[in-house]
Image: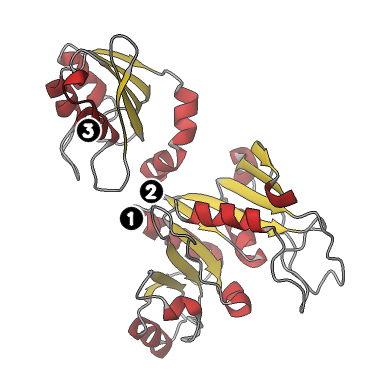
Amino acid sequence: MGAVVVAADGTIVGEGWHTVFGGPHAEVAALAAAGPAARGATLCVTLEPCCHHGKTPPCTAAIIAAGIARVVIASGDPFPAVAGRGIAALRAAGIDVETGVLGADARRLIAPFCKLVETGMPWVIAKWAMSLDGRLAAPPGADRWISSAESRSLVHALRGRIDAIAVGIGTVLADDPLLTARPPGPRQPLRIVLDSAARLPLAAALVRTAREVPVLVAAGPAATADRVAALRAAGCEVWQAAADSRSEQLRELLAELGRRRLTNLMVEGGAAVLQTFFAAGAVDEIQAFVAPRVIGGDPAALPTLPAVPACDVEEVALPGGDILLRGLVRRADMDQT
């Protein structure tokens, strides 16, 4: 969320954004940057200012105290404790309030936050790299990377901005990934392994670094007590779903992540995990890197892209010669899966 303080002559005198959960909101940061220049100025904000005591005091009180004359709000806040009350508080204080400016753009920008508030589940980004013939892995003995170095840099940058990243146990056993943002971004994501039997090897890179960057093993009810205990002793958190089926375990996990207030989850595969998320109608956004190469070979020997619903493409880029397609899943298609 962002905020800008604009003086009467159109000069920007303060900017701010919400940098971390529990930290100062964008409005407070922008007002602090503006100082006395905020009096009589216009405050432009992405999201309706809060009017309640949560992790921080109400932003409406700070706006009123700063002497702001006008507030321009792109989107209302769906959070029940706000939901129009922030706008009402500002107007009651005599401040001119305009709403809905660039509202569609703002709603897209804050879509992950809105989904968390409205459904109790995080925004899910399905990310994968594939060849022109739909292969998600290179043949044995070949370069392990399908995508370019530039594409992989984009993925690391995305990891540094999200709350959690998930892979299946098959990917861990095959690739022994670290799943961190390199170089580090504003945050390191919680690393989640979908591992119903808690098979994650204690020698895996994820386990060896679990005390540095958190690892959550999402296990099922059939995971044995000794495996759970061993992983916990090694520094991993083990969360166990109550359901037996993969789809129900996934829904339980997403609800748990929502309870933890995680806003964004990136799913990096492999094919079976992607298919589970798509089949459950859980994917909101797709980021697909298509490398200009054909792997060929036995169609049964390497994982291929599962069936996915249609999406509305928002961006097409060419990192390192690859094609990056980023778009939103069409909800009507997902609802029919």
Marks 2 and 1: in contact by CB < 8 Å? yes
**Residue type at tag 2:** Gly
Q: Which mark is residue 120?
A: 2
In the rendered structure, which amino acid carries the disc numbered 3?
Val
Q: Nearer the viewer, residue 6 or 60?
A: 6
First of labels 1, 3 by sequence position: 3
As shown in the figure, which amino acid type bears the numbered disc 1? Arg
Is 282 on the left or on the right of 15, as rendered? Answer: right
Distance from Cα at disc 1 to Cα at disc 3: 26 Å
Question: In the displayed image of the protein, which residue is found farthest to the bottom?
Answer: 226
Please identify, in this view, whether the residue under mark 3 or under mark 2 is nearer the observer. Answer: 3
| Looking at the image, residue 6 lies above or below residue 162 | above
Residue 28 bears which disc, if any?
3
- Label 1 element class: helix
Q: Residue at x 63, y 66 (%)?
A: 270
Residue 190 placement (x, y as % from top left):
41, 63
- Give the residue furthest to the left: 65
Which residue is labeled 1 in the image?
259
